[in-house]
Amino acid sequence: MKVKNIEVWRMNLGNTRPYTIAFKTVDDVDSVFVKITLENGVYGLGAGNPSKQVVNESLEDTQATLSEENLEFLIGRDIREIHGILHEVMIRFPEFPAARAALDIALHDVFTKYLGVPLAQFLGRKFRTLETSVTIGIKDVKATLEEAQEYFDMGFRCLKVKTGRAVDEDIERIAKLKEVFANKVKIRLDANQGYDQAALLKFYESSKEWGIELIEQPIKADQVDVLKQLPHEIREMIALDESLKSPVDAFKLASEPIAGRIFNIKLMKSGGIFPAIQIANIARVAHIDLMWGCNDESAVSITAALHAALSFSNTRYIDLDGSLDLVQDAVEGGFRIDDGWMSTTEKPGLGVELI
């Protein structure tokens, strides 16, 4: 069954809850969508939304990479050659992971729709449901507690709190969260490279008794040697994000001494499901846990990440709240969420449909 047509468009999705992290403020969400249609009319959807500060790719780069001229090589290709096509996508667009992710996701969607099975079933589902965290940006103590209470009332029991701008303020915020919520919620931190080694050690020493699940990318992404020299007990709770963009990175980070015991895989960094699987398998053999994360994204790519997360036995965490605060989206369906627990539908492919 051959690829007949490919459509690409850009759409502003809005954002009902702007937030601040260590290196930027997110107040709007744009995405580039891809629709791949086969000869029999079956179509698959993909979406790309890069973080320029992390992968040095702008949304304009994503859209330009997905030009009609650049995608001509896919027209007439047999979708049953899926793995060869996915490899070719990696080779053709090495510098633009969000563009590759959009194509990769659409190809996985249309292929598993062609097969008539959910993507997670094709990948080898290990879980039926996983609990996601919801993200609280950098804000003062009062606003942090108010937002945490709002999420708690909505049924969420896992919070990811953005930190990294001022360690003393971070300590105060988390101390208050623990005081108010005690053991009613799980707390994760994401410093987005905002700490130096001294600040990280200060936070760790202050928070030992709080039962923090993990600390995500506390130190600059290129300071892997610094990460590898941290005390063992700190590295055991570090989730590597901006340092981890490719299977090559995964191999380096997993080599002893490991830089962190958790890999945060994002499809917009890795370039889609195909390379994400390679990263996940490196982690599996190195006894490293997986966290699957996201940017602010369409439900298309969030659902793709969820299908992948459900398919690896070493998945321990997901942070897939990136579509929950969108004003609008290009699709409906994909996943269900019940008190913070996410699951897929049993529809073929991703289970998303154009609105």
Image: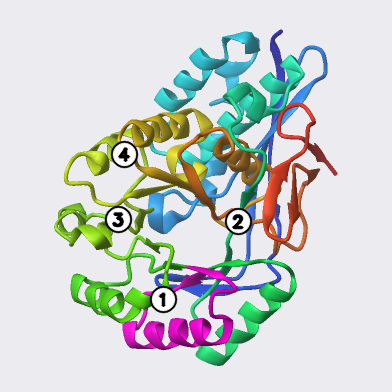
Q: CA distance from mark 1 to mark 2?
A: 20 Å
- Circles 3 and 1: CB distance less than 8 Å? no
Residue found at x 40% / y 24%: 91
Residue 62 is a magenta residue: no
Say which of marks 1 and 2 sits in front.
Answer: 1
Say which of marks 4 and 1 sits in front.
Answer: 1
- Circles 4 and 3: CB distance less than 8 Å? no
- Name which residue type carries label 2: Thr
Task: Classify mark 4: helix, strand or loop.
Answer: helix
Q: What range is drawn magenta here?
A: 160-187
Indicate which disc, 2 or 3, sits on the residue closer to the N terminus.
2
In the picture, which quadrant includes the N terminus? Answer: top right
Say which of marks 2 and 3 sits in front.
Answer: 3
Residue of label 1: 210
Residue 355, located in which quarter of the rendered image? top right
Estimate the x, y position of residue 266 in percent, counting from the top left.
Answer: 48, 46
Q: Which mark is residue 250?
A: 4
- Name which residue type carries label 4: Ala
Task: Classify mark 3: helix, strand or loop.
Answer: loop
